[in-house]
Amino acid sequence: MSDKFNPKIAQLSLPRDDGFHRATNKPLLVLLSVLGLGVGSYLYYDKSRQQLAPIATGMQLGVITNAGDPARQSDPVAQTSYAALTTAQGKPKGKVLDASGHIIARRVATISSLVTSKVETLQIEEGQLVEANDVLAQLDGRQAKYHLAGAEAELLAGNASLGELYSRLTLAEIQLKRIESLLGNKVVTQEELDTTRLLVTQLNAQIDYRKALNQKALQQVKLASYNVDQHIIRAPFSGMVIQKNAQVGELISGGMSGGGSIRTGIATIVDMSSLEIEVDVAESFINRISPGQPAVAHLDAYPDWTIKSEVLTIIPTANRQKATIKVRVKLLETDARILPDMAVKVSFLAAK
């Protein structure tokens, strides 16, 4: 190697010995270069690893907590929002689970009639509030009224016949006492006494029979009166009319096989105080729900309105096809904006 070699490299070489210098100078430079590159790479890798550790931990938690939930696995937004609810240890911060469902009414009824008749008057409209026993409609009940009048007349005739029998019995008992008093004086015979006693016995039997007939006639009157009352359609409970199913002049049938122009109901009424939420929760997350657990609900129609709620009960059965369990949530607030079948989202909070 020439003496005009780079002076900086020459300074790192051993004392001047041309043979030894030429043998050891190049490997030493290579060794120093490798060491320098190794130290630099290690420092760069350690710094990058420290910066990427929180991101990798969050991604790992998101994958673990969303395992078994196809909706969360396929929804990056849901994964990000759910990962934000957990700490590095996977413990819930505020809410422990989100679920979607609908508003349902526990008390709803389609009002109908036990008789088949024509609608004469209709006093309801959709959205109308009604109280229990309010008259909703009246049917043509003339035939039922005729039956009631006939039953009442038969009862009156029975009572009149019973009164006649009581009069005849009273007379027969007076005659029996007179004959018994005259028998000792030999004025009447034993045959006359026996005949009068038999008459009293027969009248008592006829009176008992007439009483039974009158009791039957009384029941017929009650039945006819009940049939007349069935032609007046009343509200079974307080609520709101959500559907009107008939019009004036249509036939209403109490059976389920009414066809053509025959209706099977007058209207549908919902008790607005019985509204609650029903959601489907995946089986893998049901262990996070318990009765009495606080929750908040947001209607899709009013997303900025937070409704206080709590878990009412967990339906003790699972849906095999969807692998979900129904959960009933009680609304702690009542408002006219809450309507049956509205879509709602529920956030279950950590139990206190």
Image (cartoon, rainbow, N blue to C red):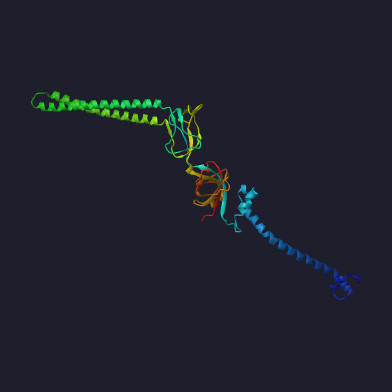
What percent of the width, then of the height, locates residue 19?
Answer: 89, 73
**Left or right: where does residue 299 sit relative to residue 129?**
right
Q: Residue furthest bottom?
A: 15
Viewer-closest of 34 and 114 = 114
Does 198 sit left or right of 116 as displayed? left
| Residue 155, picture quadrant | top left
Identify the residue at the far left of this view: 185
In the image, residue 9 above or below residue 157: below
Which residue sits at x=80%, y=68%?
32
- The number of discs equals 0
Which residue is located at x 70 percent, y 61 percent?
49
Q: Which quarter of the picture shows residue 186?
A: top left
Residue 273 position, x and y percent, is 47, 43
Q: Position of residue 152 (x, y in %)?
A: 33, 27
Image coordinates for residue 308, horizontal then vertical, percent: 52, 50
Quadrant placement of the N terminus: bottom right
The quarter of the displayed image where residue 233 is located: top left
Image position of 264 with respect to 8: above or below: above
Q: Residue at x 35, y 31 (%)?
A: 222
